Image (cartoon, rainbow, N blue to C red):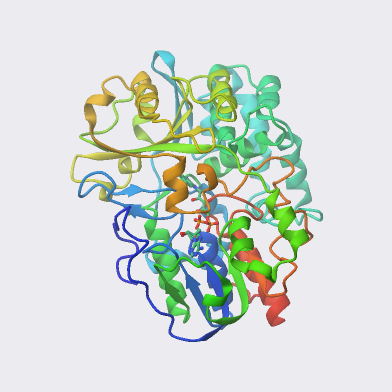
Amino acid sequence: MGGIALRGEWGMGEGMARDVPRQTRYDAVIIGSGPNGLAAALTLAREGLGVLVVEAYGVPGGGTRTAELTLPGYLHDVCSAVHPMALVSPFFRGMRLEEEGLEWVHPEVVLAHPLDGGRAAVMHRGVEETAAGLGEDGKAWLGVFGRLRDSLPGMWDDLLGPLPVMPRHPIGMMRFGRNAVRSAAGLVGSVFRTEGARALFGGNAAHSVLPLEKPLTAAVGVALGLAGQTTGWPVARGGSGAIAGAMVRRLEKLGGEVVCGWRVETLGELPAASAYLFDTGPGQMASICGGRLPGGYVERLKRFRYGPGVFKLDMALSGPIPWANAECRRAGTVHVGGGFEEIAASERRCWGEGVDGKPFVLVAQQSVCDGSRAPEGKHTAWAYCHVPSGSVEDHAEAVLGQMERFAPGFRDTVLATHAMGPGDYERYNANNAGGDIVGGVMDAWQLYTRPVARWNPWTTPAADVFLCSSSTPPGPGVHGMCGWHAGKTVLRRVFGKGPSAW
Ligand SMILES: Cc1cc2nc3c(=O)[nH]c(=O)nc-3n(C[C@H](O)[C@H](O)[C@H](O)COP(=O)(O)OP(=O)(O)OC[C@H]3O[C@@H](n4cnc5c(N)ncnc54)[C@H](O)[C@@H]3O)c2cc1C
């Protein structure tokens, strides 16, 4: 497994000589080594089961890989960069991957949202501290986040669990639901008055990849805001590949095996196992299983919906980004898109007419807090916007233009760029269908009925086939919870045991 957390190179990988499994039979085979595939494997391996993970790409990690995409010595996160959900995840908390060398690094400022005229709204690790910077909306901000904070960390177990029919923390969930069931536009319209608070909340809600007028988009704004103001939005030192590296190291210590460079096409090519867990989209699972899954179930899987794609630009920079606002220079994440109405328009357009010159751009500047990402004095930037599914347009100019708008002189710092559009993301990893990075639309219907409405969504009608990817609840993000729930289901149903306490 040499070199996994290391730089790798985007473009190599598939087609490499593949490793060979050591055995012909395992307790469980996991197809795909994203954070959920590895979480499922770890859940089973720590109970003493024999586990094999098979990965199409040359290095494990799925959405958590780091590569020198631009120039030698500049480390870029190919997909995931900022990890609020890993810190609040009961799975990650229990696994203590810090013991495997994983180090979370926090920027001085969690998130900054620049506004025209050199102003910015800023989110700090601290609800009061954030509220204090929001002027006349400070009290309203405290009203949304202050009491919720008192329900943590327990409330994350409910939020990241199966459909919370019987929540274990009902008071927290009631407080959460009060704001979360609404649309972000509805909440912002009735709760906040200032441009700063409206933009700050709207930028967080836009991670839903939904028009901000849709129900439940406020939930994403509340959850990400809450995580940011309590545990933070850290990056992994050395790059997100370090997360996969730590997971694989732990798995190998527990006797698990990871085989790379093997794109699975049929179940028949895999070693025998009592359970097969798919860290793939539902369509791929159906195709690989062939006739093993009943036709009616496969038809329902076909109705699973994917949303917009992304266009991402990674940049090697000669220096830090010259944001006009000083707080933005200290932030790990910068939401670039102006006021709430502008962001909302951008998030509507990616569902239809496409990107105009002013997309909402999510920027991470990992090198402000992690010096290992670039040579001494140099920096990196990771920036993407939502675009229509499958879009083939080059949006680099729009992304650069939005950054220059709030950081005059920025273009002069760019030494090299590397662009990936929806097609590139789908070729890189078939789970990103049409460039969708959230494993399928996260609207009110598909939130808990991923991939179909089923009491236990990680199961399928075949007793030995399970889905563990972000196309199951609780959905996208590096939290490992989809894999953990699937793994626990397999433990109970196939092996008749529950997971040991941490
Ligand atoms: C551009 C981008 C930015 C993102 N930013 C963030 C962020 O900042 N923070 C965050 O928390 N999340 C972020 N995400 C989302 C996060 O990366 C995903 O939600 C997460 O990786 C999903 O994990 P997973 O295990 O379900 O699947 P994946 O990570 O997609 O892993 C699936 C794995 O299965 C493999 N595979 C697929 N088909 C086969 C096959 N037939 N045979 C063998 N292997 C196969 C793939 O190669 C891949 O390695 C981002 C994603 C992208 C693409």
Most foreground residue, 214 or 147 = 214
Q: Is residue 407 left or right of residue 161?
A: left
User: Which quadrant holds residue 445?
Assistant: top right
Q: Can the viewer see residue 90?
A: no
Which residue ends up furthest to the top in the rendered image? Answer: 117
Q: Which of 270 and 55 is in front in this view?
A: 270
Look at 22% across and 34% down and name the residue there. 319
Residue 240: give x, y in percent of width and height. 39, 54
> Where 135 falls versus 9 (above or below)?
above
Query: Which of the image's four quarters has the C terminus?
Result: bottom right
Residue that lies at the very extreme toward the left in this rendered image: 376
Q: Is 82 displayed left or right of 282 in the figure?
A: left
Quadrant location of residue 107? top left
Q: Residue at x 19, y 40 (%)?
A: 377
Q: Residue 42: where, in percent of width, then height?
A: 53, 72
Q: Residue furthest right?
A: 166
**Residue occupying image coordinates x 60% and y 21%:** 137
Q: Quadrant of the N terminus?
A: bottom left
Residue 291 to residue 328: above or below: below
Question: Residue 135 versus residue 499: which sits nearer the camera?
Answer: 499
